[in-house]
Each structure stands twice: as C-alpha cells, then as structure tokens.
Image (cartoon, helix red, strand yellow):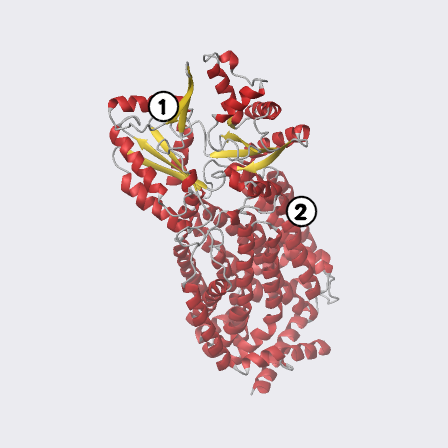
Amino acid sequence: MKTTQKNTSACASGTESVIERIFFHHRPLVILLMLAATLFFGYQASSIKPEASFEKMIPASHPYIANYLEHKDDLAGLGNAIRISVEHTQGDIFDKDFQETLQQVHDEVFYVPGVNRASLMSIWASGVRWSEVTEQGLTGGPVIADTYDGSPQELEKLKTNILKSGRIGSLVANDFKSAIIYAPLLDFNPDTGEPIDYQQFSSQLEELIRDKYESDSVKIHITGFAKVVGDLIDGASQVAVFFAIALAITFVLLLLYSRCLRSSIVPLLCSVIAVIWQLGLLKTLGYGLDPYSMLVPFLVFAIGVSHGVQIINAIGHESAKGANKELAARLAFRALYIPGIIALISDGVGFATLMVIDIAVIKDLAAAASIGVAVIILTNLILLPILMSYAGVSQKSVKKQQHVEEHGKHPIWNLLSSFTQRPQATLVILFAFALVGLGVYQSQDLKVGDLDAGAPELRPDSRYNLDNAFINENYSTSTDIFVIMVQTAKDQCSNYHTLDVVDQLQWRLKQLPGVQSASSMVNVAKQAMTGYNEGNVKWSALNRNQALLNQASITAPRGSFNADCSLMPVFVYLNDHKAETLAAVVDETEAFAAKYNNDALTIKMAAGNAGIEAATNIVIEKAQYEMLIWVYSVVGFLCLITFRSIRTVACILLPLALTSLLCQALMARLGIGVKVATLPVIALGVGIGVDYGIYIYSKLETYLKSGMNLRDAYFNTLKTTGKAVAFTGLTLGIGVGTWFWSPIKFQADMGILLTFMFVWNMVGALVFLPALASFLIKRQPVSSESEPQAIKQFDTAETQANKEAKVSHA
C-alpha cells in the first residue's frame, strides 16, 4: 500500500501539467481574453436571426429530389407554394361584395415579394379558363369574363363558367362557399435578391391578407410550407422564455445543492457564455438558426451545466479537505480536465455524425451542436475553475460538505453501491434484459415520417392545422399532392401509348387507401372526347385516333404538360401525408415503373409536397440506423483509447444503448414518428449521456487503482461524481420537461424525449454501469478485512497530497 500512497500523492500534487501552468499562471490574462471574446461573440450573436429554406429541408441528392430539381422549371408551383382560401361565411361566393374582396386578395398576393406571379392561380387569374363543345366547335374563355360588372346576370354567368372550367374542388370549394388563391413561390425575393425570409413573408400574409380582409362575413385560411415555417419561427420565439425558465430552475436547484450563491452563479454564467460564443460563432461562420436548430443552444447550456456541476462538486470536495480557493480549483481542474475533454470530444464528434444524413437542416444542426460543445471546453473546463479560484466556495458550503463526508448517512449511495455485488447485479441485469425485450417489442411500431394530418410540428388546434383541415374538408384536391413525372420524347406526351400507360397508372393509384384522386392530361382528353360526342359518357375514354387526341390535348390547362410536350405530370391527391400513405404510393409507382419504363417513356418520382416528403422519409429511414452506428462507433472508439479496455467501453455504452432503444419505444408509444425534427434527438441524447459514464468510470478507476474493492470504490465515487451526475440528470430533466407546454408540438415532443433520455442516462450510469462492472471489471485482490484500511490509506494519501500541493503552490 506504500506504493499506492506514493503514486496517489504524485498524481495529485506532482509536476503540474503544461495545460494547468498555461492557464493558472496567467489567470488575469485568460479572463481578460475570454471577456473580450464574449463581448465580440455577443455582438455577433445579437444580429443572428431565424432563417429557413425550402431546399434545406429536403434531401437534395436523393434521386426523387434530383428528378424534381431537373424538371423544376417545367413544374412551376409543384414544390414550394401557399394556398389562401377566402371563405364567405354568410353565403356562397356568387356575391358582388365577396367577389370584390376575392379580387383584392388576388391582387394583394400578386404583389407580395417572393410570389411567382406568372404561375399565380385563382378564378380571377386570366389563365384560368373554361371550355365547351358547341355546334360551332370548341369555345371558351377566362372564368371571369371581360364583361363582368358584379351584376346578377354576370354572377350567374360566373357560376356557369366555373362549372365548365373543371375547377370545382381545386380553386372553388365543393359547396361554393369559398375559393382558393394558389401562389407558387420563388426561391428568392426579387426585390432584394436574397433568399425568402419566411418569417417576414408569413408576417406579410397576416398583415396584408388576414388582418386586412378578414371580417364577420369573410374568413381567411392559409396553408403551405412558408406559413408553417413562419408560424414555427413565431412560436420558437418562446424558446427564449423556456430557456429563462430552465435557467431559473437550474439556479434554484443548484443553490439548494451547493448551499453557495457563488457556486451557483458561476457555472450558470459560464454555461450562458458558452451559448453566447456558440451563437456568435454561428453568425461569424455564416450560419443562421432555423426552427429545428433553435433548441440547440439549450442543449449547449445543458451540457455546460453538466460539466460545471462536476467541477463545482470537485472544488467543494477539495475545499472540505482544507485546500484554499486557488488550490481547490487547481486540484479540481487537474482531476477533471482529461475526462472532461474526452467527454466533450465524444459529444462533439457524436453530434458531427449527424452529417451523414443528407438533409441540409440536420447538417446545420450538427454543426451548431458541435460548435457549442467545442466552446464548452474553454468556458466550462477552463474559465469556470479559474473564476472559482477567485470566488471560492463559501464556508457554509464547506462546513456542510465536511459534515456530510464525516458524519452523513448515505442510504441511497449504500443501495446503489450494493449493485456492484453479484446477486444484486444479476437482478439489475435481468431487469435490463426485460427492458430490452419491452423496448424491442414496442419499437416495432415505430414509424418513419409524419403520423398526423396537417403540420405535425404544430399543435392540432393551431390556426394553421385548423386552416388545413378546412381546405381538406371543403375541396376535392387536398393540400397533400404527390406528383409523378412521365417523360417522353419531344412532342410525344399526348401520344396514345403514353396516355394509355398513364391511364392505367392512375387507375391503380386510385385503388390505394389514402388516395383521393389522380389527374393528368388523360382526364382532359377523356373529357374532350365526351364533349366532341354530344356529352355521351360512353365516349369518356382515350380514342386511338392520334389526331383527335392531339386536338383534345390542346384544351389541357397550363401545367398539364411542358412547353415541348416531353413531360407530363400526374397529380395524385392524398388524404394526408402520413408515412404509410406515402409508402403505398411509392411502392405502387415503383412497381408500375419497373414494368412499363422503356426508351420511349420513363416514369419518375417525385414532386409536390407529398412527393418531397416521401423522399425525405426514405432518407431518414436509411439514415437513422446508420447514424446510430456512427455515433456509437465514434464514442466507443474515443472511450477505448481513453480507458484502453473493451470491458470499460461496454460498461459505458451498454446503458446508453438501452436508453436509445427505450427512447424509440417511447416514440412508438406516444405516436411520435422519426422525422427531421426528431431524428437528431437520439444522437444528442447519446452525446450528453456519455458524459455521465465517462465521469463516473474515471473516478471509479481512480479508487480501484488505490486498492479499494469495487463496492467501496463505487461508494466513494457516488459521494463525489455520482452525486453530481444524479443532480445534473434530474435538474436538466426538469428543465426540458417545461417544454411540454410549448405551443410548438415538435418542441414539446423533443422536451418529452430529452427529459426521458436525461433521466434514463443518469439511471443507466448510476445503476446499470456498476452492475455491468461487477461482471466485466477484474476484482481487486483486497480482502474484506483490509478494505477499511485501504479506504483510510487512500484518504490519508489524498490529504497528504493536498498538503504537498499547498507547499508546491506556495
């Protein structure tokens, strides 16, 4: 044991590390530099603003999206668009005053920056026409005639034109009580040349349309990606409120934990500085904050608090043993900076593995999280102990710590340390196996994609989802459109063979559950054939006479084919965009395309909001397990090179893996799908949870090397590091638990999942890790009679180390 005591003393008080000398010998300069950096990054962060991009939300390299982008110019309006439904609450749309309002709304939308004016559609658009077959031949004209003056005769004529136009259910409601203005959007604001600011665009729609024209007799309903993002950004502004609530809760709990005001303020201050640096660096590097990465600053704050509590706990422990302010801070830094850096590197690299998901918004989130973790190394592992070397721990806190360590009872620590014994550890591991079975069973129901109609990111009773429900209930063509592209040679899109294949495709798709209808040039050709034959429905079919088909195709509305008739879109209108609905359409179309694709005709997917979401679901389904493999591989490798033991890696990672599995089961149970908003949660949970295991095992290893047996080593670990882990897990869980009341549903979902992962990662580190260690870690050859002596010698060595460190420091 003399050798052990000598090594312990040398480890604690010997030659200072180079890193420690650099920072603690120049404390004023370090503080001054970090203050300057905080002021600079604070200035940069003050100008960061929420932003969003339609193309950042989609997997740009997926074949479906590549097809859409290739033909984007020919499919104007089939990607990013808004729908504005103007409802007459006191009658139908054939009212002079209502039509004046509808015209004014159409004109107002026309001049909103970012609207693709050439593709704007409503019954007031000149390109929306009616047609019919008369004795004189084909005739037609705009739905709103040049002679329209609001008179009863003209209103009756308008009704007739609408009936002839075939726009009932798309631009006019089935009950004639509302009409839609369909506005495709550009990728940029033509006035500024900058990408569309969706928050500003959404605000303009509210101010120029809803607030201006909504009245007792007129009600406005607005849907579309731009409106969803605008509402998310507006709601996300409340993230600051929840951040403040979490800050207050953490401060109160930290004050109760440490019984020292200074020890409560300093770690919170350093964690807030980390957030400021993160936001400032994001702005400096050209990043913004989209709605899905707005929660990352809180995660950075949470990770900062987690590491800060460990340092404060270590400083209190050293102060209770008689070290002065500076020495206590130095000893805490010396003991924790290596496991702290390893834990933070594991966090950062783990977050960076999200880069494997080819969706720009997730890559941005990964960059934001990795940057945040990197700055914590400076703010919480270096700045925090330096500040505490001046502030110190209050005498009240020191006396409490001394009393607890000398006379305190530890029934909880005694219970947890008993899990290192084989009988209790066996029960814990059997319980873990039962949880694995439950997790596997429940997670079988886990779905990829949205599981609710409307915008699942928002509450079901949000204004957007109510607007979306109104449009789906009153129009035949839903807001969920899946577009299939049929490509042919030039001038061959109206070829009989092409139309016949598309007709068969439409019929097969319409048999699928969740599909409302399907339409294309085929429908126009059949309608024209009926018209050419005195309206006899027997002729509602494709005529093999190519000349007649070509003539019929001329009457097809804009958007039914491209300029050189080499591309024909097939519009599939869905009840919703749930994962199973989209998967059914994709599977049916792929099977059909495999049979009918040839050199003359190619069936491609996919455009429309539902088509783009189908591609996103495919990418996420593939990426979710690839991401987990990368996360656990990288974290496991870093733990391996740190502890140089496969057994140790298993002790740290297996509890995390159990938490990940149970999180998937919880998502399935709560009806939360794996999608852009929720996919990163599991990786973030692993990144934060690994900190607990690294800190606990690092301290446990120190006691084991001193000669203690596993139970006593773990008991002493719990009194220091374990106590901080338990406090951190519960505190952060309570903090994010407040998100449940957020108006943004995806934030509430993330709050539930992160609370679960914070708490379960803490339980895994405190309960499952020691149980695994009892089987995997080699036992020390110290008899039960000599264990108290080992503890006593270790305490004596540690006290002697402090004394020597004081002399060395002086």
Tell me the quarter of the image containing the N terminus.
bottom right
Q: Is residue 147 left or right of residue 437?
A: left
- Position of residue 644 relative to residue 235, above or below, is below
Please tell me the numbered disc located at residue 161. 1
Q: Position of residue 783 (x, y in %)?
A: 73, 66
Residue 714 seen anywhere in this rendered image of the structure: yes
Position of residue 806 relative to residue 534, above or below, is below
Q: Residue furthest front?
A: 136
Q: Is residue 288 above or below residue 138?
A: below
Residue 356: image location, x then y, percent: 62, 52
Residue 627 x %, y %: 63, 50
**Which quadrant is home to the C terminus?**
bottom right
Q: Three-letter amino acid code at disc 2?
A: Leu
Corner quadrant of residue 768: bottom right
In front: 633, or 148?
Answer: 148
Q: Quadrant of residue 779?
A: bottom right
Q: Which amino acid type corresponds to the residue marked 1 in the rendered image?
A: Asn
Nearer-N-terminus badge (2/1): 1
The label on residue 430 is: 2
Pick the front one: 592 or 696: 592
Q: Position of residue 547 (x, y in %)?
A: 56, 21
- Residue at x-position 47% and y-position 42%: 80
Alpha carbon of mark 2 to alpha carbon of mark 1: how far? 73 Å
Nearer the viewer's eye, disc 2 or disc 1? 1
**Judging from the image, what secondary structure is the residue with disc 2 in?**
helix
